[in-house]
Amino acid sequence: MKNYHLSGIAAFATKKVFSAMFLLALPLFAIAQTATDVVEPPKEFSLANWDWEFISYFVLAVLLILITARAFDIGALTERITGKKVVNWNATNRWIAIIFLLASVAGIWYEMVNHGKHVLIGDSYSEHGATIDSMFNWTFGFTFVVFVITEVLLFYFMFKYRYREGQKAHYYFHNNKLELVWTVVPAIVLTFLVLRGFNTWTKITAEKPKDAQEIEVFAYQFGWKARYAGADNKFGSHHFTFISGKNPLGLAVQDHVDSLLADLKKDTALLNKQIASAGDSAKAWKAAFVKFNTGSNATAYPAVYKELKTKMEDAESGSYLRQLKKDLRRKNTTITRITTYRKNQDVFNNAGNDDKITTEIVLVKGKSYTFNFRARDVIHSAWFPDFRGQMNVVPGMATWFSFVPTKTTEEARADKGNKDFDFYLYCNKICGGAHYNMKIKITVVGSDAEYNTWLATQTPFVAPPVAAPAEGMTPAQDSSSIVKPNTVTIR
C-alpha cells in the first residue's frame, strides 16, 4: 500500500485559511476593545505598573522551553556518538500532534464559552443590521468549516503518514482535478460573499433616503459634537477657517467671524513686535539664565532652570525666531482665507443662528436618519456598533451614513438585562493618545413628543434677542411678573 504524502496539500490550505481567519479576527478584536463602555486609560511607564507575577511565569516558561530544547540536543548528540536511537521521534511526534490538536480544540471551546460574549457585539438595532449580521455569519461559517477540515487533516496526516524506515513517500507532481477543485470551489464561495457584500453596501450608501432627518456629526481630537437644524429646518453654512474657541464647528455667523478676524489681527500685530525684538529677547533670556544659574538655584528650582535654558538655546539657535515667523505666516494665511470667503455674502444668511450643537445624539425609533460627518483635524472613523454602521470621517471630505433605529434605549436595556446600557458612537480609527475615550452617547426614544421635549432644552448657537419690555415696566419685569395690589371682593 502506497503512503501518499499529502501533508503539503493540507499545509498549503491551512496557510490560506489562517490568513482569512486572521483578517476576520481583526475587527472582532477591535469590537472587543471599542465596545467596552469603561476603558482604562494608558498608564505612564513605571516598573510599579508591571505585572511581576505574569512576568515571572513567562520567564519560567521560556526557561522550561530552553531546557527542553537543550535536552533534545543532548539526546541527538548521544545518538550520533553511540549510533543508537535514544527516542523514536517519528513515533513520538505523531502523538504530540494529536495531543496538540485536542488541546487546541479544548482551548478554543473554553475561550468561546467564557469570553465569546466579550468579542461579539450582540443584537443589531437597525433595519439593515440583520443583513450585516447574516453576512458575518456566512463568512464566519465558511471559513470556520474550512479551518476545521484542513487542521484536522493536517494533524491526521502527521499521525498516519509519519516516517517509517524502509518506506518511501509517494510524491504528487501534479493533479489537474485537485487543482480544479481547490480553485473553483473557493472562487464560487468568494464570489458569493463579495457580490452579496457589494449589493448590501450599495443599498445602504447609494443615495440618501429622501425622508431621512439629517444630523451633522463633527469629529475632533478627542470627542464628537452633533448639530441639529433649528426651527427653519436648515443647516447654516460653515467653513474650517471660522473655527475658534467660541465657534467650535466653524459656523458662518457674522459676529463670530468678525470677532475671530479682530483677534487674528491683534495676534499678528503682537507677533510682528516679537519678531522685531527677537534679538533683545535673546539677550534678555541669556542674561536671566546666567543670573539664575548661580548658587543652588538650578537644583532648588529645576523647572525654572529648564525653562530658562530652553528659551536661551531656542533664541541662540534661531528656533524661537523661526517659530514666530511660522505662526505669523499661518495667521496671515487664515486672515486671507477668511477675507476671501467673506466676499460670498450668501453664507451669512443667519441660517445657522438657530442650529443646536449638542454633546448627545437623540433619535426616534423607526425614523430614518442621515449622519453627515466632518472632521476638524485628523482622520477619524464614526462607528455605530449596535446599529452596524461605520464611515470614515476625513478633513475636507463630505461623508455620510444612514440607518433606521429599530428599538429604543429602554427596549435594548430590557433585551440585554442591563439597566445601565446605552448606545454610543465611537471612533474606530486610532487618532491619537486619547482615542480610547472618544465617544458620544446615542439615546433612542419612542415618540416624537419625547424627542421634541429634549430638543427644546438645547440652546441655539446664537441666543435669540430679548424682547423689549412693555411701556412702564423695568427690564426685569414682564406682564406675568407684575405684583397685583390686594383687592376686596364685594359679594
Image: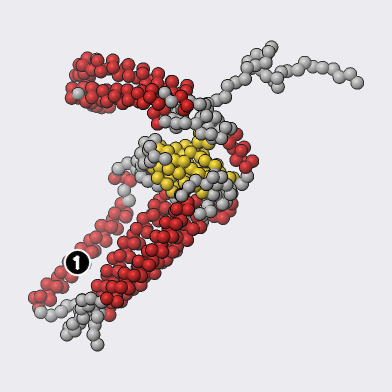
Kindly indicate the quadrant of the structure image that contains residue 57: bottom left
Question: For the point 39% across and 52% down, which residue is it?
Answer: 30
- Residue 95 shows in the view: no
In the image, residue 446 lies at what x, y percent? Answer: 61, 46
Relative to 347, say whether 93 is above or below. below
The residue drawn where x is 47% and y is 21% is 255
Residue 196 x/y as whole percent: 44, 60
Picture layout, residue 62 above or below residue 405? below
Which of these two is toward me, 275 or 285?
A: 275
Q: In screen coordinates, is 169 left or right of 360?
A: left
Number of marks in the rendered image? 1
Say few, some or many: other residues with alpha carbon within 10 Å of mark 1 (under 14 / 14 to 19 / 20 or more): few
Q: Quadrant of residue 40?
A: top left
Q: Which residue is mark 1?
A: 69
Please say whether residue 44 is visible from this viewpoint.
yes
Q: Quadrant of the C terminus?
A: top right
Task: Give how far across and how far down residue 44 sits, in percent.
Answer: 32, 41
Q: Does residue 368 sit above or below 103 in this rendering?
A: above
Q: Residue at x 18, y 69 (%)?
A: 71
Left or right of residue 45: residue 350: right
Callout 1: helix, strand or loop? Answer: helix
Name the amino acid, label 1.
Answer: Ala
Residue 195's x, y, as percent? 41, 60
> Relative to the observer, which residue lies in front, 88 or 198?
198
